[in-house]
Each structure stands twice: as structure tokens, then as C-alpha cells.
Image: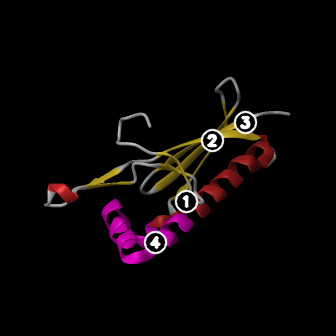
Amino acid sequence: MTKRFLALDLGTTTLAGALLTPQGEVAAQAFLPNPQVREGKDVMTRLQAAVAGRGEELRRLLAAGVNELTARLLERTGMAPETIVAAAAAGATVLVASHDQDRASVIATRTVHLDGGAVASGEPGSGA
């Protein structure tokens, strides 16, 4: 079976993706607007939306965008979904500190599945 690796860049305004060969060559690239823009054009507005209870909608929008992006990549290569054997995604982490240092919190520093399950967690830069 031919193997492909999925690389994703989850940007604030644009989602970018590539299918890579085992040798690291780019088999296909695709881009599309980040559908989360419907909930806010910038990160802070989206954080406010999440705090206001729209976090599940933000997750749903991102998952739909990643699914569409992946479908475009597979279509461009003529490959089946099962040829993707691994995936990696990168996106900005957001630090939010309150005026009370004891209550400072870190948001979005976990690596998560798009279904909401955590894969790893840690402080930014910890490698976890």
C-alpha cells in the first residue's frame, strides 16, 4: 500500500495542508479559509466566543475545515483516505493571564484530537 503523511497548518485565517511521501516529498498541497472566521476574525474574539459557550461550534468548524482540506488533498492525488498513515498539525498556542497571577491560565497548550480527546499536554515549549 502506498503511504502518505498529512501535515496541517491551522492558521487563524487560513488552513494549509500537504500530503507527503515517506521520503518527505510533497505529493499535494491545498489551502482554504479557516471556517472559524464565522465566530471571529481574530484569536481573541474566538477565545471570547469559546468562553461564552461556543467552543463546541469552534471545534466543529475546525474539524469540518480539516476534513474538507484532507478531501481536497486526496482528490488531487487520487489516493484513498486509508493511505494516510500519520498526521501532524501545528497551530498557535494562546496564553491568557488574568490580573491575578494565582489565577493565570494557559489555554490551548494541549495537543488534541479534533474529536476533543487529549493526546499530550504540557506547558508551551516543554515538548509534551
The one nearer the camera, 103 or 13, is: 103
Task: Choose top left, top right, bottom left or bottom right for residue 39.
Answer: bottom left
Q: Residue at x 76, y 42 (%)?
A: 77
Where residue 4 is drawn, which disc sits there?
3
Q: Which residue is identified by label 2?
A: 87
Q: Residue at x 40, y 53 (%)?
A: 108
Looking at the image, is mark 4 or mark 1 earlier in the sequence? Answer: 4
Q: What secondary structure characterizes most of the magenta part? A: helix
Kindly identify the amino acid type of the residue bearing the numbered disc 4. Arg
In terms of secondary structure, where does tag 3 sit? strand
Q: Nearer the viewer, mark 1 or mark 2?
A: 1
Q: Residue at x 86, y 33 (%)?
A: 1
Q: Is residue 42 magenta?
A: yes
User: x and y percent of residue 60 in the render?
Assistant: 56, 67
Q: Is residue 117 above or below residue 18?
A: below
Q: Which residue is identified by label 4?
A: 38
In terms of secondary structure, where does tag 2 sit? strand
Q: Nearer the viewer, mark 4 or mark 1?
A: 1
Where residue 25 is drawn, which disc sits there?
none
Q: Which residue is identified by label 1?
A: 116
Kindly identify the amino acid type of the residue bearing the numbered disc 1. Gly
Q: CA distance from mark 3 to mark 2?
A: 9 Å
Q: Nearer the viewer, mark 2 or mark 4?
A: 2
In terms of secondary structure, where does tag 1 sit? loop
Q: Which residues are magenta?
A: 37-61
The one nearer the camera, 114 or 122, is: 122
Kindly identify the amino acid type of the residue bearing the numbered disc 2. Ala
Q: CA distance from mark 4 to mark 3?
A: 31 Å
Q: Nearer the viewer, mark 4 or mark 3?
A: 3
